Structures are given as structure tokens and as C-alpha cells.
Image (cartoon, grey):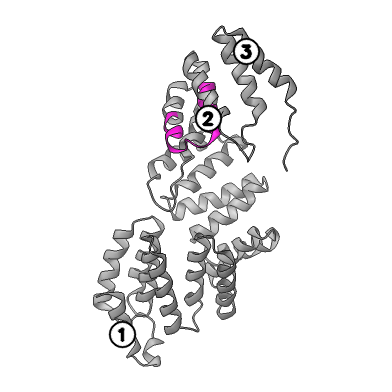
Amino acid sequence: MRAATVLILLTCISPQLLAIPCRSAEQLMASIWKELSAGNVSGAEQILHEIERTHAECPEVILAHARVAAAKGAPVEAEDLFARYADLVPNEATAYSFHARFLLERGQYPRADVLSVQALEKDPNDVVALAVHGEILDIKGQTLEGMGLLEKACRLDPLNAEAQFRLAMIYDRAKRLADAVQHFEKAVETDPEDARAWDYLALDLEPLGEVERADLAYRKGLAANQPGPHFDAFLDYNYGRFLMKRNDLTASKQHLDRAVELTPDFRAPWYERAKLNLRLKNNQQARVDAERAANIRDSRGIIIDLQLYVLLEQIYTRLGDPVLAEKYARLSRQTPVPPRKD
């Protein structure tokens, strides 16, 4: 049964019946949300077809169709379905909170902000709305207020992986690594398919001295790193760097090779692979990688020009090219160290 047909049936049902919860469908709906979180759209659709056969009168069927359409990359259809769901249950916070999450993920912050506030007016404890509005406040620079809402969301529903992840991200930026680890761990406990959370967990465990736990987190993240909403293109890069520091150069190269394939327009993977190739005495490949890195602008300052000049001087010295070695030595002397970012 298609979503439009379900809507026609719903509009013929009395408001009193619409107010009745979708009894016995809750578990199936939860399964749909879980499948969507893991990026398994086809699995979510299969469960949705089952619910349509047994609970055609359930308004949440429309919400499920909206979220499936969003996951399939059909924003116009998703918008229409979210609007239909809100028309059916205008007094329910979920009529606005999931729509707000959809808009936030598409970068439509003002509309997401409005809808998250509407959802919280209907239910101040709506976890999805709390998480969305908390994230928006953080984006707007009101980080403490946003953190407060995310903390409330996590208290109300410790199993909300997205709220745990977003709160952990704030702690990560604040360098409160132990707190970040606590919430990243809760995120992966609830959603072990979230490669992003495994990656950040590993990154924050390492400086805390938890090297073996960091290694395990990286490997679990790589096992889960499949195309979908939680795919992490920088996981191989981070693990490659980690392995290079542990002097596991062969394994490091495998991951850094993968990193430059996944993120060819970023300077950092090329730079790290150049360093690795120099250590492996692959001097010509180190030169190619370093020159490629030098031709990519790094506006975020992850790898600054000075680092590249120093590396290129080392490479050309190793290659026995004194002219180019001196060129990069001179650039190293002339290039100031940029001010440290907070």
C-alpha cells in the first residue's frame, strides 16, 4: 500500500481513533528507526510494508514514509510527507521534531530551529527536538545552552545515539576528552554501526593513554564503515597515522593508500603518506605525495605550509637534489609559524 493510499484511509478515520496509539506496532516502528540509523533503507522499507498491512490506520506510517524518503534522497517527497503527518497529528511533538532533524541534516538551520522550538512547545521532553535544538544552539555559538539541552536529551533517553554523539562532539571540541569518551562509548553501544563515533572514540582514547582501546575502536569502526549516513571518509587516514606512530609501517601504508583514494582533495592524507614513504625509503613516491599535498590548499590549517616545506627539504636532500632542497630550506626559514588557533 502506498503512502498516498494510507493518507486517504487516515483522513476517513475519526480524530478519536487517530488519538489511539499504534498498539502492537511500536516494536516494528522502533525497528524501522534502527534500520534507518544504520543506513539500511531497504530493511526499513520491508518492515514498513509489514506495518502497512496490519496497521494502515496508524498515523506514524506517514512519518515512517517521510523518513524513508529522506534516507533515499527524495527531499521533495519527504517534505510533503512530513507536512501530511503534521496535518494529521498537529498536537504531537513528533510532527515537528523529526522534520526538524531532516532539515538540520540538509543544512536548513533556520527552518530546523523553528520546528524544533514548535516540538518543544508541544513536549519539552521530546528527545529528538532537544537534540536538534541543542545542536542548533551550538552552531549559533550558544554552546553552553546547547550542551544543556543535549545533556537533558541524554538523561531522558540514554539510548539516543545521535544525542550522545552530538554531546560528545561538544566535549571533544572543549578538550574534555574523558567526558567525550564516555558519550562516544554510549553512542557506539547503542549504534555499533556508527563509524564516525568509533573514529572519534579512538581519537580521544589515544591522548588519554588508552592505546589498545583506541586500536580496538579503530578496527571496530573500520568494520562498520559502510556507505550511508554514518560513513567516515577520514577513518583510514586517522588509523594510518595511528599505526605509523606505533611503527607498524606496512599496515599504516595500506590505510593511508585508502585515505588518499577516499579524500584526494585534502592535503593531510597526502602529507602523511609522504612522511610514511620517506620512512620506507620510497623517496620518489614521497616526493610525488608531498608535491601533491603542496598543491592543495588547507584552509583549516591541519597541515600548514611550513610543515610541507620542511618535509620537501628532507625529501630532496634524500634524492640528492641540492637546488630544490635549498629552495625548500629557504622557504622554511622565510615562512612564519601561524598563530595558534584556540
Residue position for label 1: 8
Q: Amino acid at mark 1?
A: Ile
Report the residue at 37% width, 55% height from top: 39
Pointer 1 or 2: first along the chain: 1
* Mark 1 burial class by Cα count in 10 Å: few <14, some 14-19, many 20+: few
Which residue appears at 70% of the width and 61% of the height? 142
Distance between the alpha carbons at the discs numbered 3 and 2: 26 Å
What distance separates the C-alpha of mark 3 from that of mark 1?
Answer: 74 Å
Residue at left offset 60%, top offset 14% = 314
Along the viewing direction, whichever of 181 and 319 lies nearer the viewer: 319
Element marked by disc 3? helix
From the viewer's perspective, is residue 18 above or below residue 112? below
Q: Which residue is mark 2?
A: 241
Q: In the figure, is residue 317 to the left or right of 221?
A: right
| Residue 83, x across and y down, in percent | 44, 77
Measured as percent of width and height from the top left, residue 184 is found at 53, 50
Res. 15 image quadrant = bottom left
Instruction: Answer with mark 3 or mark 1, whichever residue precedes in sequence.
Output: 1
Res. 246 visible in picture: no
Q: Position of residue 99 (x, y in %)?
A: 48, 70
